[in-house]
Image (cartoon, rainbow, N blue to C red):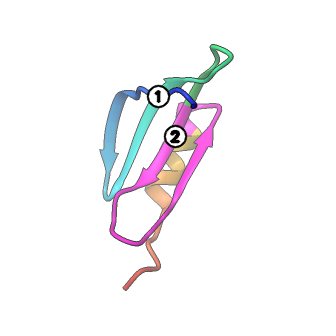
Amino acid sequence: MPRPIRLRNVIRIGPVQVGTYFDNRGREKHTAACTAPRCGFSADYDSRAAAEIAARTHRCTVS
C-alpha cells in the first residue's frame, strides 16, 4: 500500500490548497488541489511558483 502524502507549508488561495511534500525518491514536490465539491482539480508541480499560479488561475466549472 502506498505511503500517504504528508503536506507541509499549506496555503489556501480561494478554494485551492497548495502544499509541499517529498515524493518516494526524496524530491520536493508541490501540489495544488481544489476543495470545492465535485470539482476534482489537482496537479503536481516541480516548483512552488507553478503550483501557486495554477491555484490563482483555476476556475471551477462546477455550477
Q: Is residue 27 above or below residue 36?
A: above
Q: Position of residue 17 (x, y in %)?
A: 37, 46
Among numbered discs 1 and 2, the one appearing first in the sequence: 1
- Name the amino acid type tagged 1: Thr
Asked if marks 1 and 2 touch (Cβ < 8 Å), the reply is yes
Q: Is residue 63 above or below residue 18?
A: below
Determine the secondary structure under disc 2.
strand
Quarter occupied by the N terminus:
top right
Q: Position of residue 60 (x, y in %)?
A: 44, 72
The reply, left or right, for residue 34 in relation to residue 3 is left
Q: Residue at x 32, y 38 (%)?
A: 11
Q: Residue furthest right?
A: 25
| Frontmost residue, 9 versus 22 | 22
Determine the secondary structure under disc 1.
strand
- Name the amino acid type tagged 2: Thr
Q: Could you give the CA–CA distance between mark 1 and mark 2, rounded to whole angstroms?
A: 6 Å
Q: Residue furthest top?
A: 26
Residue 39's disc is none
Reply yes or no: does residue 46 show up in magenta: yes
Q: Position of residue 28 (x, y in %)?
A: 58, 20
Q: Position of residue 58 (x, y in %)?
A: 48, 63
Which residue in the protein does label 1 denote? 20
| Residues in magenta, as a range | 30-49
Residue 31's disc is 2
Q: Residue at x 47, y 79 (%)?
A: 61
Q: Residue at x 60, y 24 (%)?
A: 23
The reply, left or right, for residue 19 in relation to residue 25 is left
